């Protein structure tokens, strides 16, 4: 039975990210777009478990990695997920849903 990322040690997570990065690189080279996307999502999740959720606070806005047009406002934290909504440069909510969850590795510095 496979272990969950929450059960991995920091070193095991680091090794997992390295292996997934190599698999993603190979999938990209072979033009396997879907497989590449799966590996990228797994990398994001593994990296989230390498971070400290206490570094992120509800009521704060953070930049989004890979999305310079939006920021993310955290309403609350649940483990390695930040729940909240995206905002545009004018500070307006742009998330269609009431809220969404993002792994904390997708968040950058405080905006």
Image: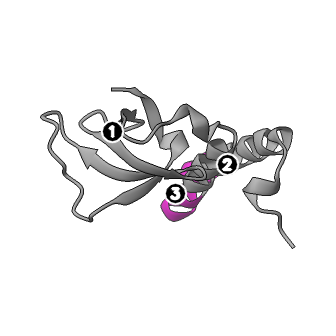
The C terminus - image quarter: top left
Q: CA distance from mark 3 to mark 2?
A: 14 Å
Residue 36, image x, y percentages: 55, 55
Colour scheme employed for the rendering of this structure: one colour
- Residue at x 42%, y 36% (from the top left corner): 65
Q: Is residue 12 left or right of residue 93?
A: right
Mark carried by residue 37: 3
For the residue carrying disc 2, how many other residues have a C-alpha within 10 Å: few (<14), some (14-19), or many (20+)?
Answer: many
Chief SS of the magenta region: helix
Q: Nearer the viewer, residue 51 or 69?
A: 51
Question: On the rendered structure, is 38 left or right of 8?
Answer: left
Residue 67 is marked as: 1
According to the picture, the residue beneath numbered tag 2 turns out to be 46
The residue segment tinted magenta is 25-38
> Seen in the image, is 3 located left or right of residue 54?
right
Q: Nearer the viewer, mark 3 or mark 2?
A: 2
Q: In the image, is residue 104 above or below residue 89?
A: below
* Quarter holding residue 110: top left
- Residue at 19%, 49% (x, y): give it: 93
The CA span between labels 1 and 3 is 17 Å
Q: Is residue 26 magenta?
A: yes
**1 vs 3, front mark:** 1
């Amino acid at each position: 039975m496979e272990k969950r990322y929450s059960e991995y040690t920091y070193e095991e997570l680091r090794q997992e990210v390295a292996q997934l990065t190599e698999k993603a690189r190979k999938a990209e080279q072979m033009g396997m777009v879907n497989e590449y996307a799966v590996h990228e999502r797994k990398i994001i999740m593994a990296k989230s478990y390498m971070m400290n959720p206490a570094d992120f606070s509800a009521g704060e806005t953070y930049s989004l990695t890979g999305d310079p047009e939006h920021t993310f406002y955290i309403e609350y934290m649940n483990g390695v997920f930040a729940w909240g909504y995206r905002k545009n440069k004018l500070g307006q909510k742009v998330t269609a849903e009431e809220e969404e969850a993002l792994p904390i590795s997708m968040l950058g510095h405080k905006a």
